[in-house]
Amino acid sequence: MSQRMIDQFMEMVRIDSESGEEARMMEYLLGAVASAGGSAELDAYGNLLGRFPALGCTGVAPVLLSCHGDTVKPGKGIRPVLSGGVIRSSGDTILGADDKAGIAEVLEAMRVSTVRPPIELAVSRQEEVGLHGVKNLDFSKISAKRGFLMDNDTLETIVIGGPSYFAIDVEITGKSAHAGMEPEKGINAIYAASRAIAALRLGRLDGETTANVGIIEGGIIRNGVPAKCAFKAECRSSDHAKAEALSVEMDGIIRREVEAAGAKVTIAIDNMCRAVRIPEASWTVDVAKSALKTVGVEARCVFITGFTDASIYNNKGIEMAVIGIGAQNEHSTEECIAVADMEKAVVALVEMLRIAAQ
Ligand SMILES: [Zn+2]
């Protein structure tokens, strides 16, 4: 099985698909799903939705398998190299194992499994830039109530949850004036932004809550009082109420400080993700743990402070655990994956589906 899977994985990473530019990858997958015995279509947003028939069982509830088809940068012109049982990029790009190894493993599992429930497959676009694909996924085409997201790096952990996330976009408007001739006629938007940022509580605020200002831009000339300044902040917490309260606090502080500086402000707050935590005793975690044991992996549950498509599926009432694909050093040019770990992931996934068919 490994040569076929490796060839397909290498073929997929050679297809450029940085976030927003997944069309060619999705086109490829339409054919790949059909060759693996399924059928697939794209939804209006360009996500791929596929189906594979049940095997060796009848009347069993469908299971959703999901991956994402986009990659981070630098992800163009990837030249994968297999050496010593490990696949790496040529050093100038990422490898794209995140998440194409997951896709290759799912397709291989579809080819080799002999007992499985009906499978629904979703491959999302634009996961890496804010889960846009899954947020726009055509959920009317999905009937599964539980499943597995093949998008964790190590096989040793199962991701059972992620935080609430608020994106805060701030635009400040002051008044321009000549900095030397008549500064008193101006209202300095950069000064107003600085006051606001200096007054915010940032960094790690408690064991489960953080806040940050990550981007600031403003002004056009050195000798002008700047009329415009904008910054982008965020806050997150595994406790939704805390994250929400913090976003309200940040909003209040920014308004107070900007107004004290005489400027005007517009603030857009987007609750991009709501905290989820599936129980360690849930069906999906149970099935995944038992299956991983058969390949010698004692997986433990983890709650992460980042995001996966599973947050959105769980928000929508589909119980999803995030399972490892065997990749290492994701989001870097050192990204790599051992063939042996890909094989283990396939054996474990096939076993998960066998258990799910019971
Ligand atoms: Zn990923």
Image (tube, helix red, strand yellow):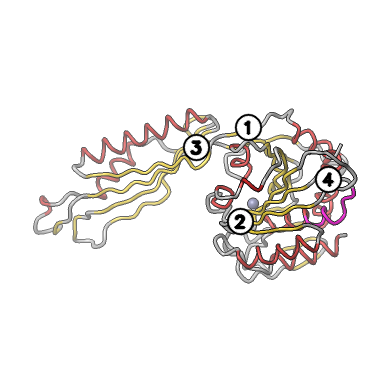
Please state which of the two labelled residues, at mark 3 or mark 4, is closer to the viewer: 4
The residue segment tinted magenta is 107-114
Q: Is mark 3 within 8 Å of ligand 1?
A: no
Of pointers 4 and 2, the one earlier in the residue sequence: 2
State how far apart marks 3 and 4 are (Cα): 33 Å
Question: Which residue is identified by label 3?
Answer: 236
Q: Is residue 244 above or below residue 84?
A: above
Q: CA distance from mark 1 to mark 4?
A: 23 Å
Write down the residue under mark 1.
277
Magenta stretch contains residue 347:
no
Q: CA distance from mark 2 to mark 1?
A: 28 Å
Amino acid type at mark 2: Asp
Circle 2 SS class: loop
Residue position for label 4: 348
Residue 358 x, y percent position in the rendering: 87, 36
Tell me the SS state at disc 1. strand
Local packing at callout 3 (Cα closer than 10 Å; few below 14, some 14-19, many 20+) is: many
Left or right, 216 with reference to 92: left
Vertical comparison of 20 with 202: above or below:
below
Question: Mark 2 vs ligand 1: CB under 8 Å?
Answer: no
Q: Amino acid at mark 1?
A: Arg
Q: Earlier in the sequence, mark 3 or mark 2?
A: 2
Of labels 3 and 4, earlier in sequence is: 3
Q: Which residue is mark 2?
A: 43
